[in-house]
Amino acid sequence: MIGAELADQMARALADASDVTTLRLLEAGAFPQAAWDALDALGLGAALVPEARGGAGLGFADVMQLLEALGRAGAPVPLAEGIGAAALLAAAGIEPPPGVLTFAAAGATIPWGRHAAHVVLVDGVRVTLHAAGSLRWAHGSNIAREARDTPTVTGVPLAEGMLPNAWGSDAARALTAMLRSAQIAGALQAALALAVDHANTRKQFGRPIGRFQAVQQQLAVFAAEASAASVAASAAARAADARGLADATFEIGCAKVTAGEAAAKGAAIAHQVLAAMGITEEHALHHLTRRLWSWREEGGSERFWSARIGALVQSAPGPLWTFLTSRDQEPSA
Amino acid sequence: MTGLRFDLRDPPPGAAALRAEVRAFLAEHERAWTPEVRARSWMGFDRTFTRAVGARGWIGMCWPREYGGAERSFLERNIVLEEMLAAGAPVGAHWIGDRQSGPLILRLGTEAQREKFLPGIARGELAFCIGLSEPDSGSDLASLRTRADRVGGGWLLNGRKIWTTFGHLCDWMIALVRTSPAPEGGSRHQGLSQVLVDLRAPGVSIRPIRDLVGEEGFNEITFDDVRLPEDALVGQEGAGWAQATSELAFERSGPDRYMSSHPLLEAGLDALRADAAAAPALGREVARLWTLRAMSTAIAGMLQDGADPVRQAALVKDLGNDFEQALPGAMRALRDVEAMPEPMRRMHDYLTQITPTFSLRGGTREIMRGIIARELGLR
């Protein structure tokens, strides 16, 4: 399976090129150039770009495991942003430029903006490509201290194009929701691994705390939530592959709601199990949990998507069940 | 954590047509169902309805034709189950035979056992129940004490099973019993066997137990020197524990582990269609339902491929039970019970009382989480 192979490749490259120090430096404002160079060399940024345009021609579902692997490492490089931006450019008929690339809906803050060479802005169906240096930047960050910068557009874009109908008029948000759902699934896996490892080594009352059922049961809940987030992200990606992004916003929204809830529950349990040590700056856990708390807000929160989904099912005629099953993908004969 | 992998699958070819067929069938029957029948879901026992389902070939539908099956795929069966539960159909008279007893007999039974039982189950004529819990053995099932001792040409069954759903209405039980003592210092899982018990045999006495709703859903069944024939044994003598636990992925991952309250969600959506303030809360439930369905369907696909996703099944059961159990509360948060339309209120009231069973039946929440914790390397 191509998705698993890519994810393995990516996980190995990430393990070689980055660690918790990379995240510390990143959060202090330094761009991890070496890690980026190593990851960029794999050519994964063009994963979703059609082969005819020089990309790998993969589908959304193919890159979900790769994005989970990125999330497990705390996303030390803007690869999710690059993959999304290149896909948007290609869809709008624009050649993706080399180097660090990011995207956002017009008016939204831009992930990694200050570190990017080029920026893709999506305003409805209009896609514009800008040299990052041509924009005036106001720096900001989320609570994971990831760069979330606000540009002022001055001058003309390097290129512009229109998204086809299949991408819809809210493509940047939907795409961000899908990318972040998968990253959340990955970050949950990594935080769970830290919590399980701690539970198996930290001793109290003469035994590892993981031997206590109260702790076991909490970690089981954590594992279930992590699995739910992962399955939901992949299922949404499959819907997007089958029907296009615009007609998969229901599934993408469901996945983001699930991922957002899982992020909150998982982070809370991880911190409970790791106790005071997990709160220290020295411990790696907070790099993951602060990302979980941040990513659940990006591309639409649980509240945002729940409201959309609720309104959609309220207005769909007939039973909810008819609506749900009408969205099943029948394989083409 | 390889035991927690899920492989997603597309629906089988012809899925929409099969759904339409089941829906048309249900439309003919559902007018007769009260809100309580719908809320009872797969705990509703209706032999007439079950025979009608059997006549359509939707019981034992994955089994070979020679035993009354339809040789359909596991994913096709999953579609039928989903549709039945979505409508709140009273499927209890065949649910256990279709889900567990039939597949067990097909897999491990003798040729004579297959011929004797499977066509009857598939026609909806033979209702099965499962004899596991005993007065002193619940989650610690291996401590069970009901015994089948070898006597000339058969077995002599003594002991007691309890909480057996529909025991008083069923024809046969497959009971897990001790056929030889646990070896000294060895595993208590040894020496257990699965036996077929005719619930009308002399020595079987059934005492229905009234539940908190005021209904008689479960029972205490006493076996007092019940003579079982030689061929009452299913599978291998002494291998009962492994046989019973090998069915768990089938038992725990189906739509019956997250859709038990579904008719209430439908009624809630109907009542709250025009209530814009209810949209986020409704959307949240729908998002969760969608995710659970993706997980459960993934397991159906893995089962079809011959995998044994027993840990994933425990995980989906745990998440699914939480969801179906919380639904009455979620609806109540959106509309005062007194202001609910009558069918919705009646479903709400029924489910409020019965939802605590969801995380008990088929293995408790604590047991499910223990299975997941073991997979995580914590036990």
Image (cartoon, helix red, strand yellow):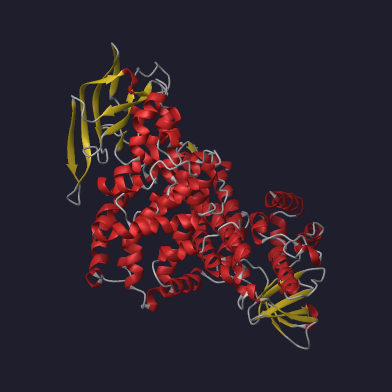
Name the quarter where the N terminus of chain B is drawn: top right
Q: Is residue B12 above or below residue A250?
A: above
Residue extending furthest toward the bottom: A155
> In percent of the image, x 76 and y 81: which residue is there?
A160
Where, by quadrant of the figure, is residue A239 drawn?
Answer: bottom right
Q: Is residue B305 above or below residue B204?
A: below
Image location (x, y in percent) of residue B78: 45, 49
Residue situated in front as seen by the camera: B218 or A209? B218
Where, by quadrant of the figure, is residue B210 drawn?
Answer: top left
Image location (x, y in percent) of residue B176: 34, 28
Q: Is residue A58 above or below residue B129?
A: below
Residue situated in front as seen by the camera: B116 or B340? B116
Q: Is residue B114 left or right of residue A262?
A: left
> In percent of the image, x 38 and y 29: which residue is there?
B115
Residue situated in front as seen by the camera: B36 or A66? B36
Q: Is residue B284 left or right of residue A241?
A: left
Image location (x, y in percent) of residue B79: 45, 52
Residue B171 seen in render: yes
Residue extending furthest toward the top: B152
Q: Is residue B281 left or right of residue A37?
A: left
Image location (x, y in percent) of residue B341: 25, 70
Residue B135 seen in render: no
Q: Is residue B336 left or right of residue A332?
A: left
